[in-house]
Amino acid sequence: MKNDSLTIADVASLLKRAGFTPSETELEALTGYLTLVMKWNKVMNLVGPYSWQDVLTILIIDSLYLNQFLRSLSLPSTPVTWDFGAGAGLPGIPLRALWQDGEYYLVDVREKRAMFMEQTVKRLQIPNTNVYKGRVENFMEEHEPADLMLSRAFMPWKKLLELVGPNIKPQGRIVVLALEPIPTDLTEGWSVEKEISYKVGKDTRYFWSLIKA
């Protein structure tokens, strides 16, 4: 699969330098996603003025760390997962190329971004991955509580717990990608399960797993 200089071999090489060695099937899906992002980005500014190399090593890389992180948690075998403000399908679509447990919902209120995600999920044949166009409040009213919610810059964590917390199952989790460690003043009813950190360029990024009592 090509997009100018974009090939599966190029993607594999960059990911190997970052410490990741996806399978051939996973590499094909990641390359397919990256190709579609760069194509759509020309007309709707999905990710800003990045090269495909930057999209891979600055944005998609979070999904690979998230895959490892989720596999280290004691999740249900078929979790229901919510991904709000999914936009360009990050972290969800590249994550689902690697981690396909349970049912996954990508939610965004913006029509063009929802259209991009729908077509991308269909094109890449990613199973059990759904796109919902609309407000998260409406989505939660229409769906049963989740086992897992992923937040990548959706909203500040305190507001997130207030909004989404009542719709997470007991012993369910919210996993937050942040640029700072877990705060000490957590909202009552939540506790820290696990945290990892990693470097992307000059930034240190963190994943926290918060578990509901």
Image (cartoon, rainbow, N blue to C red):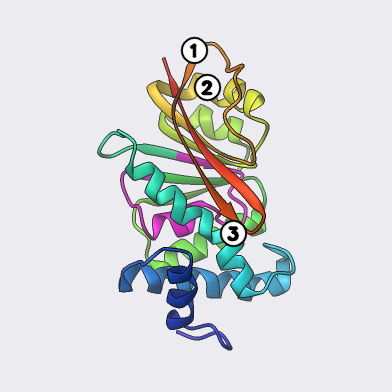
Tag 3's secondary structure?
helix
The correct choice, above or below, for 51 with respect to 134 in the image is below
Quarter placement of the C terminus = top left
Q: What number is the disc on residue 165?
A: 2
Nearest-to-viewer mark from 2 and 1: 1
N-term mark: 3 or 1: 3
Q: Picture coordinates of residue 160 (x, y %)?
A: 61, 28
Q: CA distance from mark 3 to mark 2?
A: 26 Å
Tag 1's secondary structure?
loop
In contact (CB < 8 Å): disc 2 and disc 1: yes
Q: Quadrant of residue 16?
A: bottom left
Could you tell me if residue 145 is visible in this image? no
Residue 146 included in the magenta stretch of the image: no
Furthest-top residue in view? 188
The correct choice, above or below, for 71 with respect to 9 in the image is above
In the image, is 21 to the left or to the right of 150? left
Q: Which residue is mark 3?
A: 59
Residue at horizontal 39%, vertical 71%?
27
Q: Picture coordinates of residue 182 (x, y %)?
A: 57, 29
Q: CA distance from mark 2 to mark 1?
A: 9 Å
Q: Which residue is mark 1?
A: 189
Q: Which residues are magenta?
A: 82-103
Q: Picture coordinates of residue 128 (x, y %)?
A: 35, 51
Tag 2's secondary structure?
helix
N-term mark: 2 or 1: 2
The correct choice, above or below, for 159 with respect to 114 in the image is above
Crowdedness near tag 3: few (<14), some (14–19) or many (≥20) residues, C-alpha within 10 Å: some
Residue 92 included in the magenta stretch of the image: yes
**Who is closer to the viewer here, 56 or 16?**
16
Q: Quadrant of residue 136?
A: top right
Q: CA distance from mark 3 to mark 1?
A: 32 Å
